[in-house]
Image (cartoon, grey):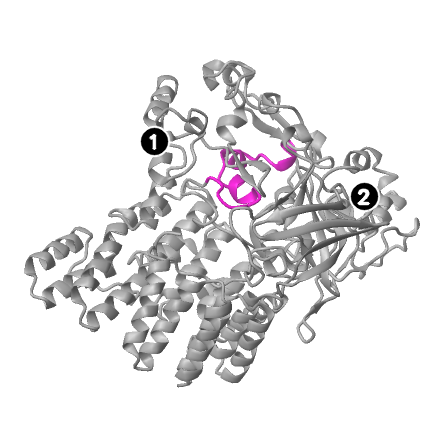
Amino acid sequence: MTGERIVIPFVALAMLSLGCKKKPETVDESPPAPTAETAPAYVGTEACASCHEKAHEDWVGSHHDLAMQVATSGSVLGDFSGRRARYYGETATFVREGDAFFVEALGADGQPGRFAVKYTFGIAPLQQYLVEIEPGRLQAFPFAWDTRPKELGGQRWFHLQPEEYIEPADPLHWTGPSYNWNHACADCHSTALKKNYDRASKRYATEYFELNVGCEACHGPGSKHIELAKAKRSAKNTGFDSRLPTLIDRRWSFVDGADIAVLATGSTSDELETCAPCHSRRADLGGDHRDYHDRYRLALLDERLYFDDGQIKDEVYVYGSFLQSKMYAAGVICSDCHEPHSATLLAADNALCTRCHKAEVFDGPQHSFHEAGTPGSLCTDCHMPKRTYMVIDDRGDHRFGLPRPALSAIIGAPDACTDCHANETPAWAERQIAKRFDTRPDHDFAAVLFSARHQQPGAETGLVELLAAGSAPAIVRATALLELRNLRSRALPALLMRASSDPSPVVRRSVAAGARDLPPDLRPEVVVSLLDDPVRTVRIEAVSALLGSDTRDWKLSDRQALDRAKAEYEQARAFNADRGEGLVDLAHLAAIERNPKEAETILREAIVTDPTFTAAYVNLADLYRTLGRNDDAETVLRDAQQRAADQPTVEHALGLALIRLGRHAEAMKHLARAYELRPESIRFGYVYAVAQFDQGRQDPALRTLSEIHARYPANLQILELLRNYNRQLGREKAAARYSAKLQALGVTPERRDFVP
């Protein structure tokens, strides 16, 4: 990732958990009618089938139906006849004994083990397998079975991380948190899941109502619906919490000679938020909330997840991409393209698109530049370019963007044109497009985000203008606020105040996150109103910004709002206490509330729970620093050198700890190592350069700073240090050069950024 990213602690980006106390999958055909006080109950898919035969028929055999199955001879597609698969120096063997399936591979301790396959996961284009490594804890095995026909390269075992060797101590090893079914997968492959993690025993007792994704996974508990149907009574939403669309009523029409249809009729719907929990990159904050943004913290356009133009990079599962699109802005929902029960497309190839885009305009070489039936002639070839995940799973980008070859070349994003025409240049592709189309930019934010992340001149102005215009998609504006925070912009406080009333919860959530680095006296002015926000994730984020605030002069109502929201904050973190992230946040809360002993205990728990989680070690070392226990801080960080995942951060923290212990020469080795491992980190480079200069190595310090300046030419802190160090060394010409650059960026001797 580029630049100095301000890490916002939040609960794990993932889903949920199992042990498995399976509840009955069928119900009495005459369920008791719930009273007015009784919450709707789950009844099971079979209870729906008799009245909804067509929907049930479509669902049977779908990806939702087969999302997770008990491992049997009928459900297991892989070859367990003793087949072996190699992975660097390791061998995995797949064995069947009667009706039982096993894998033989290295376990968490690096020793050979035999693990029982309990469940299958998915069906196409690959199938994974869940094994139980301790009672109640399921892990996804890293070898998958390629279910494609042999002539297409299938019918083989393959490793999901083939590009690098993942050893047992690595956080990405299959026995570690990243492959844990209970936390990361279960919620989206089962119906009515309860994670049921016990912190004391560190065991799961996960329950689900149905093993797979049944009717009630989307519609919600069905008992009230059945009660109304039997009584032949109607009610709002027919007894369900969610309002899903009546598909027959949705009509898209061409009006006033337009080439693209508009929604003529259609009922209000919760469909997008119904699909989003399992089709988005998000953190699960727990709770019994039906509203997506109450329970889930949607990932923004983080540069580790998306390219700067919003194209998919890492696995982001559609929703964040779709929110950027003109389709979303026009009112398109999932079922306008996808049959919701079979999870198939409503039409094949371009016939799907021409339901709303006139075929005579869009479906032909006059638009696609390619003859029908040839590569490039499908709408999706250019507007939904695919990216491959899990080695063989190609997924289309639901951003529906326009190809912009020249811009893609600048920002390092994929380009649909030159991806196919590999021997041509982006300039050639731009000329071809310009011959036929007005090349007004689509997704103007791309260049702005690229400039901000590389801290180029004009980056701050570009972000301010993007936010002031207010026309970019909400997820883009939310991302821009955090980028402005990373630039330590003087404009940030005013823009945060303005955005605190934005209609989008993701923008208001970014307001709270962006306020964290404001001076303490400014934070309440920006954030206090968000403590009573109607959306839970916004309230929780507001607490993060206000922890440690002096509330003595607050209004009673504001203090009460903080107490209520803090309880939600603690509940959300406790829900994820099976992960290092949740525990570190709980420890932070304990430290803020002046309970260092509890904070230490929780951080120790985090290290035991996830020995690879770097923040647990670094935060514990920092806690020891505040307590004057610098020797203990060093011990913790030495342990982290052996086990933590993020070694550059450990090296940096250890270097600082050794400086506090007066061991400067030894510290320099670790600060140098941190910068060597992560040269894109401004903070690592800045600290290393200061240490070099203080140790009398002035010229190496200036070279380090010059390297960072070349990478991030508008970073004010680096420019100021270059100016000041050159002045100290009597190099007035060099100092004047950097002073001129600072003045060109609007920095005067009187200017002081609000962030130290």
**Is residue 512 visible in this depiction of the protein?**
yes
Residue 701's spot in the image, x, y percent?
21, 64
- Residue at the image point whose x is 39% and y is 20% from the top: 437
Circle 1 or circle 2, nearest the eye: 1
| SS at circle 2 | loop
Instruction: Identify the residue under disc 2.
Output: 234
Q: Is residue 366 above or below residue 71?
A: above
Res 406 label: 1
Marks 1/2: CA–CA distance: 57 Å
Q: Position of residue 563 (x, y in %)?
A: 54, 73
**Mark 2 Cα-neighbour bin, 10 Å: few <14, some 14–19, many ≥20:** few
Does 510 sit above or below residue 607? above
Q: Nearer the viewer, residue 583 or 36?
A: 583
Mark 1, secondary structure of its residue: helix
Toward which corner of the image does residue 627 lie, by quadrant? Answer: bottom left
- Residue closest to the eye, 171 or 436: 171
In-image side of 738 versus 153 (left or right): left
**Near-viewer residue (409 or 50):** 409
Q: Which mark is residue 566?
A: none
Q: Please name the amino acid that badge 2 sits on.
A: Ser
The range drawn in magenta is 311-336
User: Which residue is rendered at x = 55% and y = 77% of the image?
Assistant: 604
Q: How many marks?
A: 2
The picture places residue 287, in percent across and down from the top left corner, at 65, 62
Amino acid on which the number 1 mark rests in the picture: Ala
Tell me if residue 336 comes above or below residue 564 in the rendering. above
Instruction: Pick out the residue farthest to the front.
Output: 89
Identify which residue, 530 or 431, lies in the foreground: 431
